[in-house]
Amino acid sequence: MMNYRKPFLCRHLWSSTLLIVLLFLSFFEGISRAASGLIEKTDLFKAGEQGYALFRIPGIVVTTNGTVLAYCEARKNSKSDWAEMEIFLRRSIDGGKTWEPARRIAHLGPRLPRSPVAVARKLGNDVDQTVNNPVAIVDRQTGVVHFLYCVNYQKCFYLRSDDDGVTFSRPVEISATFENFRPKYDCNVIATGPGHGIQLSNGRLVVPVWLATGDKGSGTHVAATIYSDDHGKSWKSGEIAAPHTEEWINPNETTAVELADGSVMLNIRSGSKPNRRLVTTSPDGATHWTKPHFDDALVEPVCMGSLVRFSTLAAGKTNRILFSNPDNLSSAKGKEEPGANRDRKNLTIKLSYDEAKSWPVHKALEAGPSAYSDLAVLPDGTILCFYERDKLLTLARFNLAWLTDGRDK
């Protein structure tokens, strides 16, 4: 009688062995993917779409429910900072993997007179309305999304959303907040952010702003903050945080972060000769700012940058702060003079473990042309960077493993 059991057992053992090998390969492939980390990019806005010549000035926040809101300026017919423009927004409820269609959220009010500065300097067309510099803040205590923007670099407005950015309130003008700056700095141009604002541990909402005289070209600039202690119902002006001096030339677009000790750090763009980012701190985000100093580790090609806290010692066992801007001081055209603009390229993410005193980790996110950017962090630790590249606004999703080449997860 023939024995059929042996071939069957051989086949069975071979199948089992193959299955084990495949499982091991899959396991080690998973380890390899974890070591290399996550990096994904999605284009959210493209020049020419929806009848707009260009989309610029990105901002991004993550709500208390985990919804991602990405917003920007939609410039209608021109690339100019003083062009006809509106504010557009897109929502994602799956961590930035898929997105709802873009829609206009501001300015949903009457058209306003042109700025005297724009008229005098012939900036834009006589009929243009510039809705500019959007800034969102997530209120962790109420779940509300607060939203500020300016019109014609002259008026400032406030919106709020109680449903994760599905709808927004009608605009409320808060331009009077800026009048308190005038006794010390007679500004004719005002702007919020851009990027995102922050909420402090005590509930205070803080929005970086910059002010300008608007004369003799663009005039001089200074950086400051406005704040709210009643969840956006009223707003007050802080003190000038970074004045214009021979050393600190035209401080303007600013990003903020709360430090572990409860103080607030501003990281400021300027046209200063060292071509480094300006830094100052305050105990409350509004007053008693320290003397500004240059952070030698953060180069300044004269472009907006972004800060965001990733974790705290209590919550994440490590203090981590992230920073993004174009890490470049070369210029393909023109002289590389102190304080002058450099090519906006090589957008780089940097990581600090000591409350922004040093930046030991840095990795290029976009080696080519890249400019303004804003950072946010998802509840699962995925990092979001919404940034400008060529004629696109792109969202990058990545994790600490990618940023640190697997050294920090």
Image (cartoon, grey):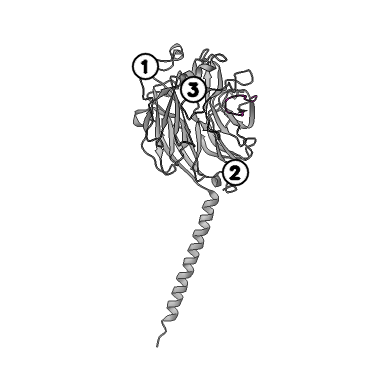
Image coordinates for residue 167, horizontal then vertical, percent: 37, 33
Residue drawn at 62 percent across, 25 percent down = 289
- Badge 1 marks a residue whose secondary structure is loop
**Distance CA(mark 1)–CA(mark 2):** 53 Å
What's under tag 2, amino acid-wise?
Ala
Decide: marks 3, 1 in contact (CB < 8 A)? no
| Residue 142 falls inside the magenta stretch | no
Image coordinates for residue 199, horizontal then vertical, percent: 52, 33
What's under tag 1, amino acid-wise?
Val
User: Could you tell me what secondary structure mostly forms the magenta stretch?
Assistant: loop
Whether residue 125 sits left or right of residue 281 in the image: it is left
Q: Residues within 10 Å of mark 3 (few under 14, many from 20)?
A: many
User: Which label lies toward us, 3 or 1?
Assistant: 3
**Residue sitting farthest toward the front:** 230
User: Which label lies toward us, 2 or 3?
Assistant: 2
The label on residue 127 is 1
Asked whether 228 or 93 is in front, the reply is 228
Q: Residues within 10 Å of mark 2 (few under 14, many from 20)?
A: few
The label on residue 314 is 2
User: Which of the marked residues, 3 or 1, is nearer the chain's N terminus?
Assistant: 1
- Badge 2 marks a residue whose secondary structure is helix
**Residue stretch in magenta:** 281-291
User: Which label lies toward us, 1 or 2?
Assistant: 2
For label 3, the residue is 191
Asked whether 115 or 225 is in front, the reply is 225
User: Which of the marked residues, 2 or 3, is nearer the chain's N terminus?
Assistant: 3
